[in-house]
Image (spheres, grey):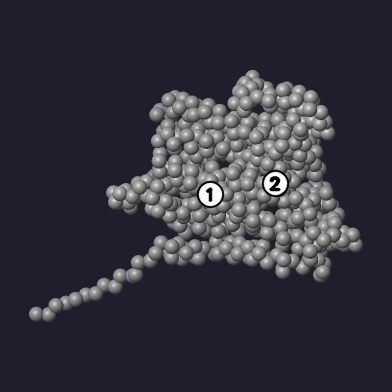
Amino acid sequence: MSATTASIRLPAPQSPTKLAIRRFLRRPAAVFGLFVVVSFVAIALSAPWLAPFDPVKTSWTLIRKAPDAAHWMGTDENGRDVLSRVIWGARASMLAGVVSVTIAAFIGVPVGLIAGFVRGRTDTVLSRIVDAMLASPFLILAIALAAFLGPSLQNAMIAIGVSAAPVFMRVSRGATLDAGTHEYVEAARALGNPGWRVAIRHILPNIVPPVMVQATLAIATAIIAEASLSFLGLGQQPPQPSWGSMLNAAQRFLTQAPWLAIFPGAAIFLCVLSFNLVGDGLRDALDPRGK
Amino acid sequence: MSSHLGARIAQVLPTLLLVSILVFCLQQLMPGDPALVLAGEERDPAVLAQIRTELWLDRPLPIQYLHWIGGVVQGDLGFSWRIRQPVVSLVATKLPVTMQLGFMAFVIAVCIGVPMGILSAVKRNTKWDYLANSIGLAGLSTPNFWLGIMLILLISVKLGWLPPSGYVPLSEDWRLSLSTTIMPAFVLGNAIAAVLMRHTRSAMLTALDQDYIRTARAKGLSERVVILRHALRNALVPVVTLGALELGTLLSGAVLTEPVFSVPGFGKLIVDAVFNRDYPVVQGVVLVTATVYVMLNLLADILYVVINPRLRGA
């Protein structure tokens, strides 16, 4: 008697992370966005070596010079090199984006996790507070907070972070409520894990993907918000360079020196667009059903 | 339907109460003594004490809040420290300007965003879809104050077609009024157009997948009728409600757009108040904005029920 054996080769199971990376890399727009974001981060980090001139050094002989071989983006109303200020401005924008979103996530994620995990009255009270914060448009709340805290980049980051926190709370609460219905949470509870351990060890790692997508999109919003606050004089203070404050100064010289307005604005646009592309790409990669 | 609306309206009151507490607490973030800010160079302890008494700053915080909210309920938002006018009258003067701008911006946003969303959904995964999506994403990524500056540079400075700044009320000269407000309205409408485009596209894609669309096509109706009379009518339900929510973002957009175009509206009022450290005006404006925003949320909910036939009988 002969036994016939047929072997079926099943593809090795792939981790969700690898699948998400593969899906992300299949989107050219998202890859382009990531490339630009990485470039901006590199520019921000290497600003001291990359900038051809001192960004705050004034020169009365170089006032409002049009772009040329020596000054690729021209000079400003105080004779400072615009390219060097745009490069250093990347540092303020990136810092504001990352720090304010970190503040927002540090406030919003734990609150959302508690609201979604504990539920009941705690959830109702926390959700009402978040509703109240969301009742005021994000930028107006950030402006009001920055106005009361006083004008500085540090206060602008705090104001943006606090104003953006309710959205993180909403996202993480929703994700926690969703995760709470899964069997692994029930299993963790059945094994006798205390509530805090279930929330931190089992639910928190599983709400990271939606929080990450939100964080990427929030960095784009935070960069625009920082530029807006600096444009209004509530962010980075002169003479330190910031894209928003450069645009504010440029308004006065639109007819004589249009390049002062073009380059910092283009930098904000490109940077925000890239973060939005990465955020959209991440969202599609992590949740292909939502596409 | 009425019970749903009743519950929704009942939710608004505690939200507004919490908003008022948050807005009141803003003042506590202020570094230093508000009386010193108001007194300026004056450092006479008697004058400072008088200011503290007048502003109720010498009372406990809960009492200060009750005094303030009591005034707010009666329509008293406080008194501007710099302009020496009631905040309510300042808001009442500036709000119509921003409302005119906001209305124009919304019309522009609907005229651009909705057709682009329809085109993008109908021509899904074609170059038209990619183009509409790219324009939408670019709209979302452009800071409106930069767009404003660029438009002034191109349309006013280079081409000389429109005045770069200023404002003329509609009642004075409607042509001049439109010429001064069309650029800021376009800038304000730009970001909303992008959001509306995305919502319309998504709602149209959902609608186009439904059985009634297949039935309409099977009946031999033209593609134009299928899209405009069947798909769009149903897709517009979520778009209208989300559009109402976007009206609230117009207020924050105005904060950046109005100073660029020197439009003396609500946005410029808050910016000027911030620079003059006129905190009662900042508080008043934030409270009014939040109240308008909450009411728009409520309006969106009511609209959703009213225009959605399935919810009308519920």
| x and y, in percent, of residue B250 in the image | 64, 39
Q: Amino acid at mark 2?
A: Leu
User: Which residue bears the numbered disc 1?
Assistant: A106
Res. A56 in view: yes
Foreground residue, A150 or A135?
A150
Foreground residue, A253 or B287?
B287
Secondary structure of the residue carrying numbered label 1: helix
Q: Amino acid at mark 1?
A: Phe
| x and y, in percent, of residue A269 in the image | 67, 55
Left or right: residue A1 versus residue A191 is left
User: Which residue bears the numbered disc 2?
Assistant: A229
Foreground residue, B155 or A78?
A78
Secondary structure of the residue carrying numbered label 2: helix
- The CA span between labels 1 and 2 is 22 Å
State the residue at coordinates (79%, 24%): B46
State the residue at coordinates (50%, 26%): B9
Residues at discs 1 and 2 in contact (Cβ within 8 Å): no
- Is disc 1 in the same subunit as disc 2? yes
The N terminus of chain A sits in image quarter: bottom left
Res. B95 in view: no
The image shows residue B194, relative to residue A121, as above or below, that is below
- The chain under label 1 reads A
